Image (cartoon, rainbow, N blue to C red):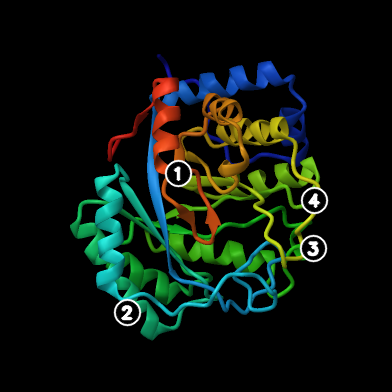
Amino acid sequence: MTKSTPIRHDWTIDEVEALFAVPFNDLLFQAQQTHREFFNPNHVQISTLLSIKTGACPEDCNYCPQSVRYDTEVEAEPLMPVDAVLEQASLAKEQGATRFCMGAAWRSPKDRDLDQVIGMVKGVKALGMETCLTLGMLSPEQSKKLSDAGLDYYNHNIDTSEEYYQKIITTRKFEMRMDTLKNVQESGINVCSGGIVGMGESQRDRGGMLMALANLDQHPGSVPINSLVQVEGTPLHGIDKIDALDFVRTIAVARIMMPKSMVRLSAGRNDMSEAVQAMCFFAGANSIFYGEKLLTTANPEENKDMALFRKLGIEPMPKNH
């Protein structure tokens, strides 16, 4: 099949709005065509995410149970020892994961902590897995240090559109998010960046978030699309949930705008029926987090994921697909 989908970095918000307005069946058809140009439609990448340092984060993200400002059931835990992390990575590999993601609840890492995390990165790479970190904001120097250690991916979600951002977080600005993505890309590390839908944002905000990512000089290697998991004690608890078809539509638009990126069906899968997840895969999602916990929110049990894969004829994506 000839490659006909252009890789663009010049989207306007009106164009993105027009894409969201395409009739649902037509949108999914276009997304599936785009997906098949660049990927095997029956392969889904399996990633595992481990929280290596939980809770007590100083930020005030309205959705996050790890913020020190909210009374949630998340217990603060210190940075895990390297050996304990490698044990979890080894287990994830046995269960079919090809990428191991490590997340720490920091605004930005201190240099002494970074040295310990680098030990984790090297250990996971020695197991033959792709490595991914999410540690908060990074300076150019920190990005280079992680690049020199061989880090494959750095996750730093932009969460929502620039316009809606200050309604969700006040302890940092949207530009600070974009600066970290720039630092990471310039150091040669692949960017993993997406956002959260279902936080009371408009469809235009969802489009604005995808536009900010698609208009980067280089599209993120992975684009996680999270459906808000409401946690009691956080400001967004009790908000109206996003309609399931609007979520699928967001996946499809992400696939069309960023044709070569992994689009990850991320947090919120626990609340989705098998039919909705199947529609997300058809719309171009080709990556999932697999395992009991997604940082601090429940994730579907591994055997449920594999049972769904069998029903759909989907296989785990081999490393270096």
Could you give the CA–CA distance between mark 2 and mark 3, rounded to whole angstroms?
34 Å
Residue type of the residue flagged with mark 4 = Gly
Q: Earlier in the sequence, mark 3 or mark 4?
A: 3
Which residue has dot 4 on it? 200
Secondary structure state at the residue bearing disc 3: helix
Q: In this rendering, does residue 119 appear at all?
A: no
Q: Amino acid at mark 2?
A: Asp
Asked if marks 3 and 4 touch (Cβ < 8 Å), the reply is yes
Q: What residue did someone put label 1 on?
A: 301
Q: Position of residue 8 (x, y in %)?
A: 57, 36
Which residue appears at 41% of the width and 49% of the height?
291
Instruction: Give the residue displayed 65% in from the left and 56% down from the top.
Output: 159
Dot 4 crowding, Cα within 10 Å, few <14, some 14–19, many 20+: some
Pick the residue in front: 234 or 174.
234
Does 4 sit left or right of 316 as displayed?
A: right
**Number of numbered discs:** 4
Q: Tell me which label, 2 or 3, sits earlier in the chain.
A: 2
Secondary structure beneath dot 4 equals: loop
- The disc placed on residue 167 is 3
Q: Label 4 vs label 1: CA separation? A: 28 Å
Q: Position of residue 196 (x, y in %)?
A: 65, 51
Amino acid type assigned to the residue bearing label 1 in the image:
Glu
